[in-house]
Image (tube, grey):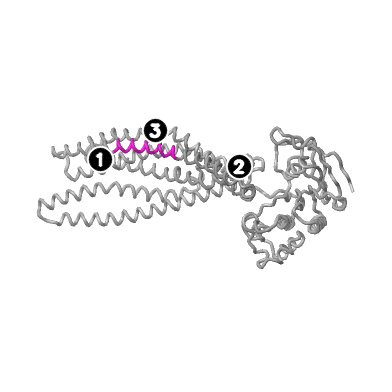
Amino acid sequence: MNAYVFYKNKFRLGIFMVFQTIRIVGTVGVAVLINLLIDAVSVSVAGQTVKPLMNCILICCLYALALGAVIFLSERLMAANIKHIMLQIRSGIMKGILRKSMAEYQQKNSAEYIAFFTQNLGTFEEHYLKNLVSIYDSLVSIAIAMFLLFYINPFIAVISVAAMSIPSLIPKLFGKRLGIIQGTIMQNTAGYHAKIKDIFSAYEVIRTYRAEKQMEELHDSSSVLLESSKEHAADIMAVLYGLANMSSVAVQFLIMSLAGMFAVKGLITIGSIIAVTQLTGQVISPAFQLSAKISQLRGVRPFCRQIEENLPAAATYETETALPEMEKTLMLDNVSFSYGDVPAIDHVSQKFERGRKYAIVGRSGSGKSTLLKLLAGYYDNYSGRILADGESGRKVCAALIHQEVFLFDDTIRNNITLYKPFDEETVETACRLAGLKDVLDRLPDRLDTEVDENGARFSGGERQRIAAARAILHRKNLFLLDEATSALDSETTEFMEESILSLENITCIAVTHKSTPESLKKYDEILVMEHGKIVNRIIQ
């Protein structure tokens, strides 16, 4: 993660730090100008002339203009740096997540990923990146203010150093508790997002079965957990800031009183009293903020660990290549697989040859869909071997078309092409082979029609045809169909089967529930599954 924050942005950060340092020096230097201004007033009053005062006012005005320009530039540079860092981190994390294996990806609920991108990264930006800037500001401000205090009066400077430790120690007492509560907030946020996602995804079911009240109660209980944890964190911060500010104000009053006593004895000027007051604030307030920001930095560690877990996978992005095609055979050799403690595939051996068409039939729960997912390379934690062209463990590119089709909230064209460049004729041909032409002819915008969220404006059969067109267009030579025609009428099913099964050099392995003798005659081999085993093979 540090590579994304520092190394990849070292030039930008260097420029920003220069302007930020000038900004801090200029802000602290205001106290020196106030000292000069008050002393100029005293000189003007004593000499009955405004010339010293006017000269000082001119210098102050020019100083204010220059400081304003520097502050503007430093703010713009900080915003640009944070934007650049966050874009790189978001992009890196997305690349890392998209390159997880299916088994690894499914270890988390999709709502956790959503919460991570929406809220957790926002917390990282506020409590990590901006805190780093605040910590740097505090350190530089303290150093410059202490130097000026020693220049004005070493004794007051020593007292300031001792006094600033009081408010700065208070936040350290709360660092561990803040870390724990931030972890709780992260968990409750993911839980809340998961509940929201479930409710909205099941909206039709909820309305059909009149379960609105129960869903409201589930939502409210999850919402209470989230907001209560956030309130707890706010309570801790309230106590922290209250104690630290109380001690900070008390210390400033003490040092100002001492400065007044020194002025009475003639050890410092009246202007120096104001300067000491200003500089003391530039020491004590940043010291308090420094400790508080460090505590917040520790509290955001769970988010940083989550980022680091996903970023390393992105490092392999440039070296990744497309999966090879199946050249001759894809073979299962004594393969077994379980979902946790639940067995799904039991010592299956089977060879699939390039260009042949296979139908897998069997009762629900017999392992048909799981077998397809293993062939697609979804899972690695199986026993036995899966060999592609005789090579164990080598995955091949395949098009897996599910019964439940997901569509992006975009146009039909982009759902078929997946944002890759294809000429119009090739796309239209894929649509025709998938039985989608009649659907497109009814739409004014044809391929440029918006499908709405997950294809809400289309029937299940129409969504499956879009998915089939997608697979045909991308010319995968291995088609894995998981009841891909279940939502289609008989005529369209027959047309799609003919289209897919007639494709030359394409290996098709289809799980089908429409196992009529007529439909099964189209396949070269029929595999019958029971209880995770292939119990019968019919070669035609």
Q: Is residue 257 magenta?
A: no
Residue 209: give its label: none
Res 148 quadrant in image: top left
- Residue sitting farthest toward the right: 540
Q: Is residue 262 above or below residue 17?
A: above
Is residue 319 visible in the rendered structure shown here?
no
Q: Which residues are magenta?
A: 231-248
Check disc 1 and give the amino acid type.
Leu
Q: CA distance from mark 2 to mark 1?
A: 56 Å
Closer to the chain start, of discs 1 and 3, is 1
Residue 109: give its label: 2
Q: Is residue 378 above or below residue 175?
A: below
Return the residue at label 3.
172
Residue 149: give its label: 1
Check disc 3 and give the amino acid type.
Lys
Helix, strand or loop at disc 1? helix
